[in-house]
Image (cartoon, grey):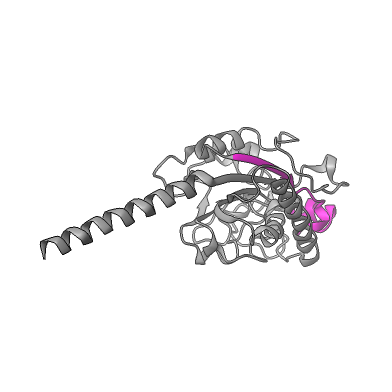
Amino acid sequence: MRSKFLTLFIVNVLLSSMLMGQSSTEMENEVRIMIFINGNRGPKFNHVKTDNQLHLKDPTGYWYKYDDTILSRFQPITPIYFDGHFPVSSSMHRTNARFLKAYFFSRFCWFSRKSRWVMNTKFNPEGFKEREESGKIAGNHFLNYLDSTDLKGKSIKVDFVTHSMGYAYSLGMIDVIKPHVKFGKMLSIAPESAGFKGYDWSEFEEVWQYGSNYGEPNADVICYQDGIALQMPIKGIENINKGGRIFTPKDWPKSQKGFMRSHHLNWFQWFYLIKPGDKGYFSR
């Protein structure tokens, strides 16, 4: 009886060691890549569209220092950048005139928390699809990049950070690369048309959406909302394993909120107020 117990104990130890060694080897062979996808780059570039090219550094300075901060939390990790810029015509605004109309009248909505006609609330399926299709092109460029480096054959885990129009672009990328990689975490900052289309987010470890609180109980009044990309829940975000929506803090200065400032990364410094242990802290 004693010898049988000893035999079982030794077998258990050996199996545990083998599994731990296998797990350790898998982790050593796993390569983590973070993909940053920016949105519209402003009126100066409104006549151009993305070239869908892969970059190893931020080619336009779009991300300020947010990317550096996030990357420092995920080391070791390889950053990759794609330009998700598209003209206003692909957004819910559709035209510059409708954009300007919403901007002008939103400045006088000091009491209402819901928009009946001021904000542009109808989706633009054609524009969203165009951005998504560009993301598929980028996805193929990403796979070509993997094939052209020593990463081929290794286990790849991909994290995403997107802003604004970059959200639709990311969905196209996800669709193309999903048979070849594992998904890690996703941070979507002020996504444009977030409620139009989603994904099976249970395939991700975490999904976080940062932005203003339009449509929520006790939401900010219209004049303090993100008017560039009216915020709504990412479609399917309720099915996530871990994550959710993180709103602009209630005590954030009103001078730092509004149609443009609640959207533009230059006024998203409340990102740095989210500390380790807080809900929404984005790290490895």
Name the image quarter holding residue 81.
top right
Residue at the image position 54 percent from the left and 47 percent from the top: 30
Is 257 placed above or below 72 here? below
Residue at the image position 68 percent from the left and 62 percent from the top: 175
Is 85 placed above or below 122 here? above
Residue reaching furthest to the right = 47
Residue 181 position in % (x across, y down): 61, 56
Is 243 placed above or below 71 here? below
Regarding residue 277, the answer to whether it shows in the image is yes
Residue at the image position 60 percent from the left and 59 percent from the top: 112
Regarding residue 211, the answer to whether it shows in the image is no
Report the side of 231 relative to 2 (left or right): right
Residue 192 position in % (x across, y down): 68, 56
Residue 284 position in % (x across, y down): 48, 44
Q: Nearer the viewer, residue 210 or 179?
A: 179
Q: Nearer the viewer, residue 153 or 219?
A: 153
* 54 drawn magenta: no
Is 176 placed above or below 37 here? below
Q: Nearer the viewer, residue 259 or 3?
A: 3
Residue 150 position in % (x across, y down): 66, 42
Quarter the N terminus occupies = bottom left
Q: Which residues are magenta?
A: 78-102
* 82 drawn magenta: yes
